[in-house]
Structure formats: structure tokens, C-alpha cells
Image (cartoon, rainbow, N blue to C red):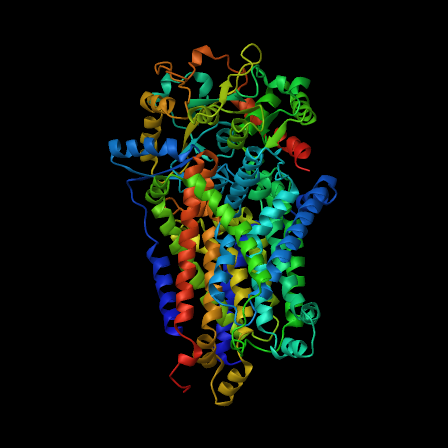
């Protein structure tokens, strides 16, 4: 490693630990100052049958959500990789739309659709059929709603893995007369690790979810944590209670990291498949249409119906424009900063183990938003420069960036898989330094994947609320937080209208990223390496 | 690409640094748990009258995330907030016990009856909500008139309450624990469960699902119940236990934060909030908050305080039971 690379590595590491680990340490360290009390509280937690039962139910919910999301997302990921599939980027964006809306807002839309007095039952009643209320207020209902919200994650994982498979392999199988099922059996071992990674991410997301299970009266482990904070005002107990979920999430992420590292293919991203356009089959279109209908059209339709008349949308815009602006600013700045930190760091440790970066980032996400938020307050709310940061927009940036840095890191690591090794080797052989190769070869070559990571980060920050609710300075309220605030007291039309506006704003950000991704490519670069 | 990223990075740093700066001396920061649609117009009116700038931070009960109280406790070494305007009183009392509040009694507080004020001057109550029974008029002609009616066999599976770990339902649970004792209080909730009374996410959901006919009746607050009535839904509400243990009143409370950056501005805001005009405004709003100042006349649907048999439980005693009730109810209900 050159001196510059070492400097970059140490500086980056310091930033990651300051951003992610320090707030967690601020919250958890006091626990170790009184080890006796901590040990006895941990023991009572570990020996509580009720807590184990809750943990088991939460894990079961996570597994069922992951399974449903994978059953939906994986076939879609494969379908979208079919050669000559027309309008691919737009369909990928369309199918990613559920991630634009907060899960609790989608849950409310599903209550409108499938609830006892919902649209479906209303139609059944009018048709003279007896209404059969879908068991929404159960763990099955939670799993369905969360799967419809998170299936884009396995979709993208499988699509990314499928893109890396040598096209000669399925072509050879096709030429040898292998049917579709046989070709799938051939590809499955190559796709399985990425599919498992996507499923594990959905599992961890579900472990940490609170709003949807709470709305559907399903007891989950996060209720324990929130009760400790909100009802008992016992932060110490809340931090201890967060540990089992944190450890479970870490185990899942460790498995995902191992699967990704062990089975990462050596072939880098390919050019678009050669050969003439091949029409997508009718079954592909039917599956995509049904998914789009179930996951996007119906819930957005329910939200739009709640938002009518149009004057409600206009009124929501007038009252919410400042919050939407705050969210867009926060998302743009945080996504950019996280990328500026994660990408060079990922480049410097490329090919090596990076657990010492992954785990602080994972910890910041897994400890739960309120624990992280309280840690931020304890770290920054002091007289002097720390207090200046706490009193302003900067603390929102620290909160959103610290919580979501894990995804910046994972995204950059994945993006680097797309870089052709030969290109890097040629540059090195020509005498280019590591940082030179990063700036003049890697970044231009990975423009599209990097912009995709940026878009994902912006999307995550737009939806961040569990941490920002604690630290948002007066006058700096993201729109996701406003929706959360209004959900209890506000008219449902206003809430739905704001949620739609949030989705539109997020889609706008993604379109801008997509525009930049489509505007230039490696082949357009004219300047030679110097 | 790299130039774009570098430029964006510099912009980010500038934005972050540029956002730092000193606080405006005319700024008053209020943390308020009262819904924005009710509190914002009042704060705007105070701004216009006083010339001070008011920035409010609102609470969220929707998904029961950690709220303003946690924030106030953690910021106590260096508060951002000047005034805490809570829409209930138990957690205000807990903040007093944690040393987050400063004693201050505005002159306007003299008109508020003593039972709705802290004896040491750390908080003053005003504009109360009542815990009421909301019922669907299409489904029930003789609704329960007492919370203990929820345990009757004829009402099995027909009612709902919000999770008694958060919000005013938690306050109500603590009041019952204080009034009946923890054993009988816990037993009440056990029997609720056994009688098929559903535990929903929030008071708003109780209102919505009763109005939609999914449940025949439920326990909620006056502001939620009145919302269903004003929306033209088939719902009505009544004050429970008027012949028995009385209805729990949950007043708004206003308190000064210890070490507030703008204590003088905060005091002016407190005085304004305790004025008869504010209680009148809240009474006339959709939330129909009950004026505690006898000089403020109740109108329309707002019951007069003198006409209500109030639950005879001290707010301090109720706050003392909050933790016990929360722990025991969590053991019972979250599994």
C-alpha cells in the first residue's frame, strides 16, 4: 500500500468509526461502568421466556418476509436480465418503486384495500358475495405487506449476480438442447449466494421494523426496546434490550458477507449481451404486470384515492414544501458524503478483508434508531464546536449518514465487482498509482454502478425517521418525519397526499441519478491515461 | 465524474459548515406534543402578537417512537428547548422528577384550579381532554357507560382500546393502577384480554375502526372521538363512569425547561398559552379541549368542567404508577 493509500485508509477508518461506532459507544459504554447491574439485567433478559418467545416470533416473521420477498424478487431479477429485454432500466425503476414509500404508509394503503371495510370487501359485497376479510392483522399480513415493500432487494441482488454470469454458459446449455428448467438448475448455484444475500438483508430489515407490526397488532421484539424508551424512560434497559436483535442481525449479515465473499465470481460486469433482440415471453410480461399491480398500482391507487380531491395534494404541497426541500437536501448531501467516504475506502481495501469497517457500520444500523439517536445526543450535545454541530442541520446529516453507511459500504464493494480487472492491471503496468487508478480509471468506468449506489443511499435517507425523530433541530424537519407526526392526528388525506409527494420527490432524485448514469459511458471518454 | 464528485463533496462540506451558527435571541423553541394542526395556529398568533419567532418541534404518537420526553432528558445538560407543551401530564411529572424542568408560575395560572397545577410550580395544566367511550351508532344502541362494562359478556369481542403502554392510554392505565392498586389494575387488563377486547396501535386507530364498524365501541380521547363525529361517520361518544369512579381528565401542561436558552421568551409563551383566549380557541377547534379556567365558557359539544364527574386520582400518584403499570402491562400484553 502506498503512503497516500495508507493515509486515505487511516483517515477513512477514523471517519467511519466517528460516524458509526462513536454514537453507539456513547450509548453502550455507560453499561460497562456498572458491570454488576448490567450483568444482572442481561441475565434477567436471557432467562425471560417472554423475551425468547418475542425473539422467536420476530425471527419467524423475518424469515417468512424474506422468503416471500425472494419468491417475488428473484424471478423478476432473472427476467430483467433476459437478453434484449426492452426498456429494461425503466422497468427496473418501476419495480423498485415500493422502496420509495415508507412501509407504514404502504401498510395503511393495504388496510384500505384488504381491511374488513376495505375496497376488496366492498366489491365482494356489491357483487353479492360474502366478504372474506383477509387476515391482515396477523403476522402473515405483516409478512405480506413487508415482502411487497422489500422484494426489490432480492430483485437487485439476483439481477446483479445474473449480469456477472458468462453469457456463454446459458447459451451453451441452450445450444445443447437444455430446457428452461435445466438451464435454471445450471444457473441456480451461481445465483444462490446473491439471492441468499438479498434474503438476509430483507430478514434483517424485518427484524428491525416496528411501525408495520405495530399497526397490525403483531408483537415483535422492537416493541420491547421502544417500551423501555417511551414508557419506562429507561435508556439503559433499552440499550441492553437492543443487544439480542443486534447480535441476530450481525449473525445474518456475517452469513451474507461470507456467502458474497466466497462465491463472488471472477468475471466482471459485461457489456450488454451480444446478439439480436429477443422478445420477452408472455409469461414474463404477465409476472411483471401482476407484481407491478400488486406492489405498486394498488397501494399507490389507494393512497391517491385517500388524497383526493386534487386540492388536498396542492394544500399538502404548500404546507410540506419546506419539509420536502429538507429531505431532498438531506438525501443529496448524505448520499454524496457517504459515497465520498465509502468508495475510496472500498478501493483501498479492495480484495482484502474489511470486517473492521463493515462491523461498526453494521452496528450503527442494527442497534435500532432510537439507541443510535440517543448516542448522537450524548456525543454531540456539549458546549463548544460539538454543540454548534448539534444545533444545526449537520446533526441530521450525521444521523442519516451514520445509520445508513452500511449500505454505502456494501454498495461500493458490490460496485467494484463490476470493474474489469484487466483495465486495472493495464493501468498499474503503465505505472499508475493506486489513487491515480481510482480517480482516472475506476470512477469513470463505474459511473453507472456508483450512481446506482448513490440513488439507493438517497432513497434510504429519504425514508429515515427512527433516528432523525430524536435529533432533528427545530426548523429542520424531513418530510418522512412530518408524515410520521401526522399519522396519528392528521387527516388521512393529508398524510396520503404528503406520502405521494415524498414518493414523487424520491422518484425525481432517482431520475436525476438515472439521467447522469445514462449521459456518459466509458466509451465516451476521450482523454487517455497519463 | 471525479470533478463532479469533488465539487459535490465541497458543496456538502460548505453546506454543513454554513449551517452552523448562533441562535437568534428572539427565537423561542417549544417542544409540543399537541398535534400541529391545533398548536400551530396558536403559536402563529403568539408570534404575531409578541414579535418573537417561535419554532416548534412536534411529537409523534403514530408508531410510538421515542419522543420529546427522551429528547428533553438527553438534552438536559444543554437544552435546545425553552418550553415544553405536553398534551398530557404524567410524563411532565416524570420530567420534573428528573430535574429537567424549572419552576415558574405565570400570573395567568392563578385562574386554573389547584388540582390541575403542580404544587411546586413546575407545571400548569390547561385545556383538558377526557378519556371517552366512542361507539358506532349503526352497531350499538346501548353502548357501555363504564370502562368496567368492557368486561361484560354481552360486549365480548366487540370493543377495543389502544395499547396501554403509550400515550393517554398509558396515562389512563397508570390512573387505574393508582386508584385501584396495581393488582386490581393489572387484573382489569387481563380480563379485558379474556373478554376479547382488542388492543390496537393507537387512539386514532380505535376511532377509525369503530367508525368503520369493525368494532362496536372503544376507549379513546375526546379529540379523536370528536373527529369521527365531525367527519360525519356513524359515531358518537360519551363520558364514562359518571355514576361511578368518574372520567379521567388529561390536561395539557406547560412548563419551562431548566437552563432554557431563551427563558424570558419562554415565560411569555407560557403566559400566552395559559390565557383564556387559547383555551377558548382549543375548545372551539376540532379537538374540543375542555377549558379548565372557569372564566372560559364551554360551548357546543364541549362539556363544562363543572358538569363532569372527574376521576378522583391525583396526577402525582398517577405518575408514580407509570413505571409499575408499564412493566406489568408489557409482561401481560407483549408476548
Identify the image quadrant of the C terminus of chain B.
top right
Q: Would you place residue A357 above or below residue B181 in this image? A: below
Q: Nearer the viewer, residue A357 or A41?
A: A357
Image x and y of residue A14, in percent:
51, 65
Q: Which residue is painted at 62% across and 17% down in the image?
A: B149
Q: Would you place residue A277 above or below residue A41 in this image? A: below
Q: Nearer the viewer, residue B42 or B319?
A: B42
Q: Would you place residue A441 above or below residue B238 in this image? A: below
Q: Nearer the viewer, residue B252 or A390?
A: B252
Q: In the picture provided, is B50 more to the left or to the right than A235?
A: left
Q: Which residue is painted at 57% across and 69% down in the image?
A: A82
Q: Which residue is painted at 49% across and 65% down in the image?
A: A453
Q: In the picture provided, is A150 more to the left or to the right than A455?
A: right
Q: Which residue is painted at 56% across and 77% down in the image?
A: A268
Image x and y of residue B225, in percent:
48, 24
In which quarter of the view is residue B10 placed? bottom left
Image x and y of residue B214, in percent:
58, 29
In which quarter of the view is residue A53 placed? top right
Does any portion of residue A472 appear in the rendered image?
A: no
Image x and y of residue B166, in percent:
55, 33
The residue lying furthest to the front in this view is: A128
Amino acid at each position: 500500500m502506498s503512503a497516500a493509500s495508507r493515509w486515505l485508509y487511516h483517515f477513512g477508518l477514523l471517519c467511519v468509526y466517528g460516524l458509526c461506532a462513536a454514537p453507539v459507544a456513547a450509548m453502550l459504554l455507560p453499561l460497562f461502568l456498572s458491570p454488576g447491574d448490567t450483568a444482572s439485567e442481561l441475565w434477567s433478559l436471557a432467562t425471560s421466556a417472554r423475551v425468547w418467545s418475542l425473539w422467536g416470533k420476530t425471527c419467524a416473521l423475518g424469515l417468512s418476509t424474506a422468503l416471500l420477498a425472494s419468491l417475488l424478487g428473484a424471478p423478476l431479477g432473472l427476467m430483467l436480465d433476459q437478453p434484449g429485454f426492452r426498456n429494461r432500466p425503466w422497468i427496473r425503476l418501476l419495480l423498485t418503486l415500493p422502496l420509495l414509500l415508507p412501509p407504514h404508509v404502504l401498510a395503511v394503503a393495504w388496510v384500505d384495500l384488504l381491511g374488513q371495510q376495505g375496497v376488496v370487501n366492498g366489491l365482494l359485497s356489491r357483487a353479492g358475495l360474502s366478504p372474506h376479510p383477509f387476515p391482515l392483522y396477523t403476522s402473515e399480513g405483516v409478512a405480506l405487506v413487508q415482502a411487497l415493500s422489500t422484494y426489490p432487494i432480492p430483485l437487485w441482488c439476483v439481477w446483479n449476480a445474473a449480469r456477472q454470469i458468462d453469457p456463454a454458459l446459458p447459451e451453451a446449455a441452450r445450444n445443447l438442447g437444455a430446457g428452461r428448467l435445466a438451464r435454471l438448475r445450471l444457473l441456480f448455484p451461481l445465483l444462490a449466494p446473491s439471492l441468499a444475500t438479498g434474503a438476509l438483508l430483507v430478514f434483517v430489515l424485518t427484524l428491525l421494523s416496528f411501525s408495520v407490526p405495530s399497526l397490525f397488532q403483531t408483537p415483535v421484539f422492537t416493541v420491547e426496546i421502544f417500551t423501555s424508551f417511551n414508557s419506562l424512560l429507561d435508556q439503559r434497559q433499552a440499550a441492553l434490550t437492543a443487544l439480542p436483535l443486534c447480535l441476530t442481525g450481525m449473525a445474518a449479515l456475517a452469513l451474507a458477507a461470507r456467502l458474497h465473499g466466497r462465491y463472488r465470481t471472477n468475471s466482471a460486469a459485461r457489456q450488454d449481451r451480444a446478439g439480436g433482440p429477443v422478445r420477452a415471453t408472455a409469461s414474463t410480461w404477465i409476472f411483471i404486470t401482476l407484481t407491478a399491480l400488486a406492489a405498486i398500482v394498488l397501494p399507490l391507487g389507494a393512497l391517491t384515492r385517500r388524497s383526493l380531491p386534487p386540492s388536498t395534494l396542492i394544500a399538502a404541497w404548500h404546507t410540506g414544501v419546506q419539509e420536502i426541500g429538507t429531505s431532498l437536501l438531506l438525501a443529496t448531501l448524505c448520499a454524496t458524503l457517504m459515497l465520498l467516504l465509502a468508495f475510496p475506502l472500498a478501493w483501498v481495501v479492495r480484495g482484502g478483508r474489511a470486517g473492521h469497517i463493515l462491523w461498526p457500520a453494521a452496528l450503527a444500523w442494527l442497534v435500532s434508531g432510537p439507541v443510535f439517536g440517543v448516542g448522537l445526543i450524548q456525543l454531540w450535545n456539549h458546549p463548544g464546536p460539538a454543540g454548534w454541530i448539534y444545533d444545526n442541520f449537520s446533526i441530521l446529516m450525521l444521523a442519516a449518514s451514520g445509520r445508513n453507511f452500511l449500505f454505502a459500504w456494501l454498495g461500493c464493494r458490490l460496485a467494484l465487482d463490476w470493474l474489469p480487472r484487466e483495465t486495472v492491471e493495464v493501468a498499474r503496468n503503465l505505472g499508475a498509482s493506486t489513487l491515480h487508478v481510482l480517480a482516472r480509471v475506476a470512477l469513470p468506468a463505474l459511473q453507472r454502478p456508483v450512481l446506482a449506489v448513490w440513488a439507493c443511499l438517497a432513497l434510504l435517507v429519504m425514508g429515515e425517521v427512527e433516528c432523525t425523530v430524536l435529533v432533528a433541530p427545530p426548523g429542520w424537519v424531513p418530510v418522512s418525519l412530518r408524515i410520521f407526526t401526522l399519522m396519528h392526528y392528521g387527516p388521512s388525506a393529508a398524510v396520503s397526499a404528503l406520502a405521494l409527494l415524498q414518493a414523487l420527490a424520491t422518484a425525481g432524485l432517482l431520475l436525476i441519478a438515472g439521467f447522469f448514469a445514462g449521459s456518459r459511458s466509458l466509451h465516451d471518454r476521450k482523454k487517455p491515461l497519463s | 465524474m471525479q470533478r463532479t464528485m469533488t465539487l459535490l463533496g465541497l458543496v456538502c462540506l460548505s453546506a454543513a459548515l454554513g449551517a452552523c451558527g448562533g441562535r437568534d435571541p428572539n427565537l423561542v423553541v417549544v417542544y409540543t406534543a399537541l398535534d400541529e394542526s391545533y398548536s400551530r395556529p396558536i403559536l402563529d398568533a403568539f408570534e404575531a402578537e409578541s414579535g418573537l419567532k417561535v419554532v416548534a418541534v412536534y411529537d409523534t404518537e403514530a408508531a410510538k417512537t421515542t419522543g420529546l420526553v427522551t429528547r428533553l432528558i438527553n438534552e438536559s445538560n444543554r437544552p435546545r428547548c425553552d418550553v415544553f407543551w405536553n398534551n398530557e401530564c404524567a410524563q411532565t411529572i416524570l420530567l420534573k422528577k428528573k430535574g429537567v424542568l424549572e419552576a415558574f408560575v405565570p400570573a395567568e395560572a392563578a385562574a386554573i384550579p389547584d388540582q390541575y397545577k403542580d404544587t411546586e410550580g413546575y407545571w400548569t395544566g390547561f385545556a383538558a381532554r377526557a378519556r371517552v367511550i366512542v361507539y358506532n351508532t349503526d352497531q350499538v344502541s346501548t353502548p357501555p357507560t363504564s370502562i368496567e362494562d368492557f368486561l361484560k359478556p354481552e360486549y365480548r369481542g366487540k370493543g377495543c382500546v389502544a395499547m396501554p403502554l403509550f400515550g393517554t392510554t398509558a396515562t389512563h392505565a397508570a390512573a387505574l393502577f393508582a386508584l385501584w392498586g396495581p393488582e386490581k389494575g393489572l387484573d382489569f387488563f387481563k380480563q379485558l384480554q379474556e373478554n376479547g377486547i382488542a388492543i390496537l396501535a393507537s387512539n386514532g386507530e380505535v376511532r377509525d375502526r369503530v367508525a368503520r364498524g369493525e368494532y362496536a365501541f372503544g376507549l379513546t380521547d375526546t379529540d379523536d372521538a370528536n373527529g369521527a363525529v365531525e367527519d360525519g361517520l356513524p359515531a358518537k361518544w360519551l363520558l364514562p363512569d359518571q355514576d361511578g369512579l368518574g372520567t379521567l381528565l388529561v390536561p395539557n401542561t406547560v412548563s419551562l425547561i431548566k437552563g432554557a436558552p431563551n427563558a424570558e421568551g419562554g415565560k411569555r409563551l407560557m403566559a400566552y398559552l395559559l390565557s383564556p383566549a387559547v383555551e377558548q380557541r382549543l375548545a372551539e377547534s376540532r379537538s374540543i379541549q375542555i377549558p379548565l379556567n372557569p372564566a372560559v365558557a364551554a360551548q357546543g359539544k364541549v362539556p363544562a368542567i363543572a358538569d363532569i364527574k372527574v376521576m378522583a386520582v391525583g396526577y402525582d400518584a398517577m405518575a408514580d404508577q407509570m413505571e409499575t403499570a408499564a412493566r406489568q402491562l408489557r409482561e401481560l400484553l407483549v408476548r
